[in-house]
Image (cartoon, grey):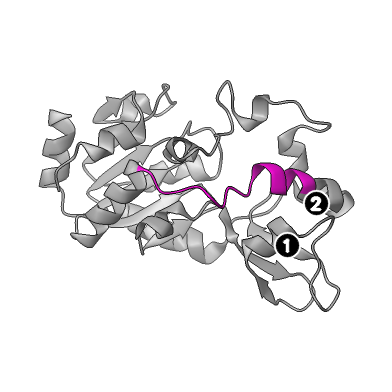
């Protein structure tokens, strides 16, 4: 913690890159841990259900899983989200780049957030483009439909879909201009997001994760602990 504090205090432009482990302390399960979504049993594997092909071929089953496992609308920001919002407000943190779709960074007060995989809080009719809040999806049954009759799709990036170009470009611009990058709560095993570290040209790379990652050897500092616990101890 002493080393982390020294790094943060000396930094002028920090970018935070986070994954599912940032939200587990808010009660949202991650995907690849022992008790994560990928290790639970369903009629289909979660990675199959969360694909574009499955969405198109079995939309009713997709939405049954989506409502049950992906819409954690009652979740509240934890210590990590709140500290990052505080750091941004004080001018220490320039951006948050997240793989999460829960919107908790914005709920905590962060403004410059790049959501690589979209957000459950944005839902659009595939025919007319009308916007619907997540509560509409949650409270619907079967396949949620627009008043025009079209299917409403959550604005989340499914397997087989590409990332949004504007979001990617914005995130890479922030990462490449940062002097410090804090990577937390991610296994760094999902591409293309994991490859974003290659664009960091700054001095200090900090990794905070419960388990080891493939990038630990590249880091200035590695901390194996809960993200909220670590960040909440920082003075900014």
SS at badge 1: strand
Mark 1 touches mark 2? (CB < 8 Å): yes
Q: Which of the two residues, 98 or 181, is positioned nearer the viewer here?
A: 98
Q: Which residues are magenta?
A: 64-78
Where does residue 25 sit, x and y in percent of width and height? 43, 36
Mark 1 neighbour class, 10 Å CA radius: few under 14, some 14 to 19, many 20 or more? many
* In this rendering, position of residue 8 left or right of residue 112: left
Q: Which of the two residues, 198 or 139, is positioned nearer the viewer here?
A: 139
Q: Which of the two residues, 68 or 157, is positioned nearer the viewer here?
A: 68
Tell me the quarter of the image containing the N terminus: top left
Residue 159 in view in this figure: no
Where does residue 109 sit, x and y in percent of width and height? 34, 60
Where does residue 85 sit, x and y in percent of width and height? 30, 55
* In this rendering, position of residue 94 left or right of residue 34: left
The residue singled out by tag 1 in the image is 153
* In this rendering, position of residue 198 left or right of residue 182: right
Q: Which quarter of the figure has residue 123?
A: bottom right
Mark 2 neighbour class, 10 Å CA radius: few under 14, some 14 to 19, many 20 or more? some
Where does residue 42 sit, x and y in percent of width and height? 78, 30
The dot on residue 108 is: none
The residue singled out by tag 2 in the image is 55
**Residue at mark 1 to residue at mark 2: CA–CA distance:** 9 Å
User: Among all residues in the image, which is located at the extreme right?
Assistant: 57
In the image, residue 72 lies in the stretch drawn in magenta: yes
Chain-order first, disc 1 or disc 2: 2
């Amino acid at each position: 913690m002493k080393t982390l504090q020294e790094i943060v205090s000396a930094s002028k432009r920090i970018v935070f890159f986070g994954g599912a482990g940032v939200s587990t302390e808010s009660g949202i399960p991650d995907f690849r841990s022992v008790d994560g979504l990928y290790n639970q049993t369903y009629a289909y594997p979660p990675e199959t259900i969360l694909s574009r092909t499955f969405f198109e071929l079995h939309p009713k089953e997709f939405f049954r899983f989506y409502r049950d496992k992906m819409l954690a609308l009652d979740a509240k920001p934890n210590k990590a989200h709140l500290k990052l919002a505080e750091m941004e407000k004080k001018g220490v943190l320039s951006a948050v780049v997240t793989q999460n779709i829960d919107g908790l960074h914005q709920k905590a007060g962060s403004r410059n957030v790049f959501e690589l995989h979209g957000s459950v809080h944005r839902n659009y009719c595939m025919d007319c483009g009308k916007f619907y809040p997540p509560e509409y999806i949650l409270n619907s049954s079967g396949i949620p439909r627009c008043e025009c009759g079209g299917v409403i799709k959550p604005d989340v990036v499914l397997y087989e879909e590409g990332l949004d170009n504007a979001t990617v470009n914005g995130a890479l611009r922030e990462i490449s201009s940062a002097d410090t990058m804090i990577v937390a709560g991610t296994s760094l095993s999902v591409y293309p997001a994991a490859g974003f570290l290659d664009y960091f040209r700054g001095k200090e790379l900090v990794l905070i994760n419960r388990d080891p990652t493939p990038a630990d050897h590249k880091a200035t500092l590695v901390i194996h602990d809960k993200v909220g616990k670590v960040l909440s101890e920082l003075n900014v």
